[in-house]
Amino acid sequence: MIESYYKSQDKKFTLIQNDVLEVLPQFDFKFDMVFADPPYFLSNDGLTIKNGKISSVNKGEWDKSYGFDEINNFNRRWIYLIREKMKDDATIWISGTSHNIFSTGQTLIELGFKILNIITWEKTNPPPNFTCRYFTHSTEQIIWARKKANVPHFFNYELMKELNSGKQMKDVWELPAIAKWEKSCGKHPTQKPLSLLTRIILASTKDSAWIIDPFTGSSTTGIAANLSNRKFLGIDKEKEYLEISKARKMEIEDSFTAEKYRARISGFNNEEQLNSFLVREPVAEYKLEDTSLDEAFRKN
Ligand SMILES: C[S@@+](CC[C@H](N)C(=O)[O-])C[C@H]1O[C@@H](n2cnc3c(N)ncnc32)[C@H](O)[C@@H]1O
């Protein structure tokens, strides 16, 4: 039986503390969408500027690079395993920079995924490049792919167009980097903004969908999922980060806080747009029983 690290009372938010390579083969459950923000393997003692001061780029042991072969091997193993956890019409989003994005992209193609888009997330407030030997690094890439070339995926085309003043939304998204208010429960060194995850979730899932994040960190994916009425399973090796995740979920159990956060999510034309969308969003035809994840955990 798989032990959850934490399970919320509403059963919409579950965390597991384990190595993703160990735990994925231990249960059988199919998800509608995967968001993965794997180690970028960029903690190589380089320097950057943070709050006006020169600081190390190092994130932690989990982000150290042991060479390209190791990175490739790791990416092959987790992408192969997560593929088994996806419904046939499910999609996967993988974020990265030049350090790992070529490896994850190549692996997706090798494993038969169909690449749908490569989103460029352009940060409106990037740190300056103090070496003055490169252009300022101001983007991250996010690959969006579907599991099977011949099985159609879900794309919330109309909503994305609506959120873009009636024009087709492009694959370049201008969104701010993480804001202070998103760190109210503690700091994760690579926390993603809620605005980015909300857009991803609304673009590619229906109401009540099941979403998995195999490198959950502070669980931005799970918080965005629950604020949008989706269900979530997050995996991380580090207890410290799962504690932040748990605190973030408990924070949004207060409906006043949840409303406040929804209103602060940017990328929408006006503050009320996300809320009004969530209210009138059609309820999905498929409804998994809330107990099915528990059953999958019991059966291993
Ligand atoms: C880039 S961070 C994810 C940050 C997250 N998107 C957020 O918004 O907080 C990657 C996470 O993967 C975790 N991790 C690294 N290797 C892992 C592994 N083999 N199994 C499970 N978690 C792992 C790290 O502890 C780290 O929290």
Image (cartoon, grey):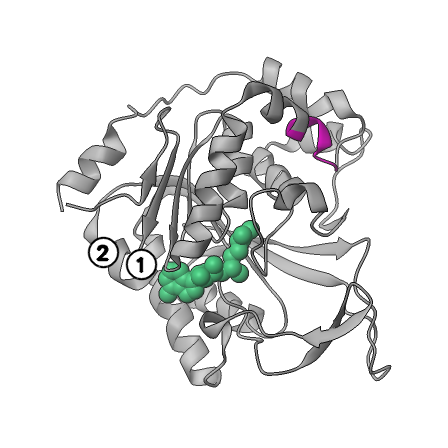
Residue range of the region highlighted in magenta in the rendering: 261-266
Q: CA distance from mark 1 to mark 2?
A: 7 Å
Q: Are the two marked residues, 1 and 2, in contact with CB atoms closer than 8 angstroms? A: yes
**Quarter-wise, where is residue 1 in the image?**
top left
Q: Residue at x 82, y 83 (%)?
A: 131
Tag 2 or tag 1, which sits nearer the N-term?
Answer: 2
Q: Is residue 194 above or below residue 137?
A: above
Residue 165 rendering spot, x and y as whole percentages: 82, 30
Specify few, some or many for label 1: CA neighbours under 10 Å numbering under 14, 14-19, or 20 or more: some
Identify the amino acid type marked 2: Pro
Q: SS class of the residue under badge 2? A: helix
Residue 139 rendering spot, x and y as whole percentages: 73, 62
* Residue matched to label 2: 25
In this picture, residue 242 sits left or right of residue 196: left
Magenta stretch, overall SS: helix
Q: Residue furthest top?
A: 280
From where the camera sits, is residue 37 visible?
no
155 drawn magenta: no
Specify few, some or many for label 2: CA neighbours under 10 Å numbering under 14, 14-19, or 20 or more: few
**Quarter-wise, where is residue 289 in the image?**
top left
